[in-house]
Image: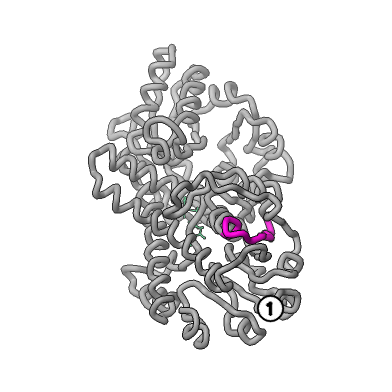
């Protein structure tokens, strides 16, 4: 919304939320989320044509276009629990819109929703609005930005997708929204589609991106078993223009608020449509992701002589990717919980994630574990969690370091100094393949990198 306000000075944009603390934060220079470049965009438009308010009724009532960007988490109970999307917030928003509307509006689905949600929402809107002159036209306009690069992605999107009904009013609504984006997005990048295709395109895009990572992660396991190098494999296949070079980095596992949630949602939709084979196919992307996290922990344990009990392990990076403080579904949660379940003491360092967030994630998040017989019952020993704001201190006295997020600053540390302060033999497990492994080995570290050959002597002894 900040980008729309920046690019369309004649359009008034009001962001509304019932959460007063959040709205208050949006009105300061300490925004409630960390996103490079966002503050500059907000500062330029705020007070001019961008406003933040808790007066939901007034501003929704006055609007011509309402973007609904509420949470659509995975259902935790009831029918479809663990897979289906929970549309409680969406339905609540639709009821509010219906109750305060005295003029016709275009309602835009921004949140990722199951296919055919627009149908359900339209019913809620129409049946709850008493004014017969009010018409709601629903559009699907999924968001493809990625965290950490949101501003770049919004500034020059690969495409903007707008789905609507193939009726006169539907087509008019599509064009109205397209004219907003046309302020800065070239026409050929504004794609029009029918409602269901647009909704499904979003789920499919995320499922296929995640599938690429799971595919490379599966190959990383094979590389370790055979002596091949997953980065060389990725580079080789990425030059095939049909495959392309992006999103081929093997990792400790993908995280973030979208991939797992959207795949589970897709799986659920397939199951309800009676397409069990299709559901199984996509579910495997998540199974492979869980396996990768589990495999990483097993690798740490086996490398450190099959016991990590009472050993200090420094965790470099807790966010689900670099340049964000977001920890939703971060692989670091499962990896730390796995290490702690085997008795390790973890000391987490992350440049952006708050201490409270790390504690909350490690103590209250459900513990999902690959093949674990009773995943949610694994007890958490809070004394095994430490947090440091200094990467050197985090590694002091540690037996090993696990790199779990690809923060750029991890590449430039003085690893000789890090090594000097660690217990020997000192291990590094590079879950993102970002460090200079050769240099680390020269310092004296025992280095394990994902999908990479081990040092020759280690290969002989431990493989
Ligand atoms: C994703 C989609 O990219 C975006 O289009 C959609 O709108 C929301 O979901 P996001 O979750 O912000 O965006 O991050 P993304 O960059 O896609 O990364 C997701 C996860 O995959 C991260 O944990 C990242 O570290 C991991 N990843 C990404 C890899 O492990 N390897 C890669 O090659 C790329």
Q: Is mark 1 within 8 Å of ligand 1?
A: no
Residue 15 makes an appearance in the image: yes
x and y, in percent, of residue 133 in the image? 41, 15
Colouring mode (rainbow / by chain / secondary structure / one colour) = one colour
Quadrant location, the N terminus: top right
Callout 1 crowding tier (Cα within 10 Å): few <14, some 14–19, many ≥20: some
Taking the magenta stretch, the answer to whether it contains residue 345 is yes
**How many marks do you count on the picture?**
1
x and y, in percent, of residue 446 in the image? 60, 79
Q: Looking at this view, is 458 or 170 the one in front?
A: 458
What residue is at 45 percent from the left and 74 percent from the top?
451
What residue is at 67 percent from the left and 38 percent from the top?
48
In the image, residue 402 sits, relative to residue 276, either above or below, namely below
Tell whether 198 sits left or right of 344.
Answer: left
* SS of the residue under disc 1: loop
Residue 182 makes an appearance in the image: no
Taking the magenta stretch, the answer to whether it contains residue 245 is no
What residue is at 44 percent from the left and 55 percent from the top?
370
In the image, residue 303 sits, relative to residue 263, either above or below, namely below
Tell whether 74 sits left or right of 443.
Answer: left
x and y, in percent, of residue 61 in the image? 54, 22
Q: Looking at this view, is 298 or 39 the one in front?
A: 298
x and y, in percent, of residue 150 in the image? 55, 53
In the image, residue 42 sits, relative to residue 346, either above or below, namely above
Q: Looking at this view, is 321 or 359 the one in front?
A: 359
What residue is at 47 percent from the left and 21 percent from the top?
95
Residue tagged by mark 1?
A: 424
Q: Which portion, as a residue range, is magenta? A: 339-352
């Amino acid at each position: 919304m900040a980008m729309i306000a920046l690019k369309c000075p004649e359009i008034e944009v009001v962001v509304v939320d019932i959460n007063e603390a959040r709205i208050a934060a949006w009105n300061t220079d300490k925004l409630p989320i960390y996103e490079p470049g966002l503050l500059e965009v907000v500062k330029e438009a705020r007070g001019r044509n961008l406003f933040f308010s808790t007066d939901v009724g007034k501003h929704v009532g006055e609007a011509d276009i309402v973007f609904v960007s509420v949470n659509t988490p995975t259902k935790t109970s009831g029918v479809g629990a663990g897979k289906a999307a929970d549309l409680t917030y969406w339905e609540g928003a639709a009821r509010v819109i219906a109750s305060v509307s005295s003029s016709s509006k275009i309602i835009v689905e921004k949140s990722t929703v199951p296919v055919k949600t627009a149908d359900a929402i339209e019913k809620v809107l129409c049946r709850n609005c008493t004014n017969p002159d009010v018409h709601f036209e629903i559009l699907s306009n999924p968001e493809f930005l990625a965290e950490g690069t949101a501003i770049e992605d919004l500034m020059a999107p690969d495409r903007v997708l707008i789905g609507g009904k193939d009726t006169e009013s539907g087509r008019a609504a599509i064009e109205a929204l397209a004219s907003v984006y046309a302020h800065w997005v070239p026409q050929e990048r504004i794609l029009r589609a029918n409602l269901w295709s647009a909704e499904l395109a979003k789920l499919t895009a995320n499922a296929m991106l995640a599938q690429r990572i799971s595919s490379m992660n599966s190959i990383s396991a094979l590389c370790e078993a055979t002596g091949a190098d997953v980065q060389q494999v990725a580079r080789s296949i990425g030059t095939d223009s049909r495959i392309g070079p992006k999103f081929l980095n093997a990792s400790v596992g993908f995280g973030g608020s979208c991939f797992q949630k959207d795949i589970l949602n897709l799986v659920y939709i397939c199951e309800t449509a009676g397409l069990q084979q299709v559901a199984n196919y996509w579910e495997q992307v998540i199974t492979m992701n869980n396996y990768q996290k589990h495999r990483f922990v097993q690798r740490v344990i086996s490398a450190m002589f099959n016991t990590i009990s009472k050993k200090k392990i420094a965790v470099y990076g807790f966010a689900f990717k670099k340049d964000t403080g977001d920890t939703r579904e971060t692989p670091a949660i499962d990896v730390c919980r796995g290490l702690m379940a085997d008795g390790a003491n973890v000391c987490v360092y992350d440049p952006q994630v708050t201490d409270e967030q790390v504690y909350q994630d490690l103590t209250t998040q459900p513990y999902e574990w690959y093949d674990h017989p009773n995943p949610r019952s694994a007890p958490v020993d809070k004394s095994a969690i430490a947090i440091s704001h200094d990467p050197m201190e985090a590694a002091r006295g540690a037996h090993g370091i696990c790199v779990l997020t690809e923060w750029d600053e991890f590449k430039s540390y003085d690893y000789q100094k890090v090594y000097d302060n660690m217990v020997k033999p000192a291990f590094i497990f590079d879950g993102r393949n970002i460090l200079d492994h050769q240099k680390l080995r020269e310092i004296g570290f025992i280095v394990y990198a994902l999908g990479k050959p081990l040092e020759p002597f280690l290969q002989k002894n431990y493989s």
